[in-house]
Amino acid sequence: MNQTIYLFRHGETQYNTQGRYQGELDSTLTEDGINQVKMNARILKSLIKDPNEWEIISSPLGRAVESTKIICETIGYEFSKVKIDIRLSEVAVGSWAGLTLEQIEVGWKNNMENTNLYNWYFNSPDGESYDTVVKRLSSWFKDIENLPNVIVVSHGLTGRVLRGVYSNLSKEEALKLEVSQRTFFKLSEQNVHKISSDFDDF
């Protein structure tokens, strides 16, 4: 069976504009964030035929659900049909949730040693490990393997790992993947194709 997955990140949030890492906390979408989702959803509408031939699955976190509602309204899909799956939640960063990188570097200096721009998230003393996230996303992929058409609304870091699992990338490769909120991705036949609202490349 040929399967197509469209993977979305939620729109920009208030915490995003403040440089705060949300993890499992939540923050409402900004006006720009709402417009980002609407633009991406309009592109999606042009790519799919009948929206009712698709399954939409969302993270349960508020910013993802809010984005999902905008997508549903734009493409003509009943929100009540959306499936919520906790495995699509953002990576939990424990005590670091709601903090800026500067605050984390001051409070947990030892945890930030030998890390880089891409992997420090997983050094939270009470957060999720990379392997734990890979395990829950691998389980999710297994459960949807018989669904031909899937639209997913998730998060920045989780979306990176999800694409990494799909493409069999190493941790280092996966964590360097793009996470722009003006971009979504088509996953099909083991290929990942970027679709951007900044360019007419769709």
Image (cartoon, grey):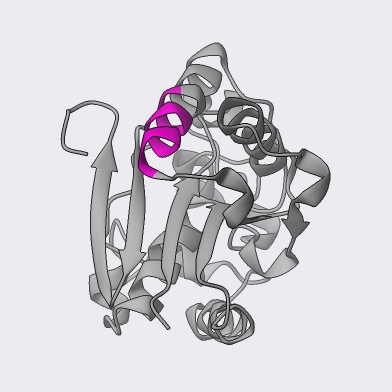
Q: Quadrant of residue 190?
A: bottom left
Residue drawn 56% across the image and 32% down it: 75
Asked if residue 59 can be seen in this view, the reply is: yes
Percent from the top left, x then y, of residue 62?
Answer: 74, 40
Residue 126 lies left or right of residue 71; in this view the side is right
Give me the residue at 75% from left, 58% from top: 83
The magenta region covers: 39-47
Q: Residue at x 27, y 59 (%)?
A: 177
- The total of numbered circles placed on residues is 0
Q: Quadrant of the N terminus?
A: bottom left
Q: Is residue 69 magenta?
A: no
In the rendering, at what x and y percent does residue 172 appear?
A: 26, 75
Please tell me whether the stretch drawn in magenta is mainly helix, strand or loop.
Answer: helix
Q: Residue furthest front?
A: 50
Asked whether the viewer can see residue 110, the reply is no
Quarter occupied by residue 70 = top right
Instruction: Answer with left or right where residue 3 lies relative to residue 108.
Output: left
- Using residue 161 as the reference point, say whether residue 138 is left or right of it: right
Q: Is residue 170 above or below residue 178?
A: below
Q: Position of residue 137 (x, y in %)?
A: 56, 77
- Extreme residue in the right direction: 80
Q: Residue at x 29, y 78 (%)?
A: 167
Camera-side residue: 50 or 185? 50
In this rendering, is residue 111 above or below 83? below
Name the quarter where the C terminus is drawn.
top left
Q: Indicate whether 6 appears above or below 66.
A: below
> Residue 42 in magenta?
yes
Q: Position of residue 103 (x, y in %)?
A: 53, 41
Q: Is residue 112 left or right of residue 189?
A: right
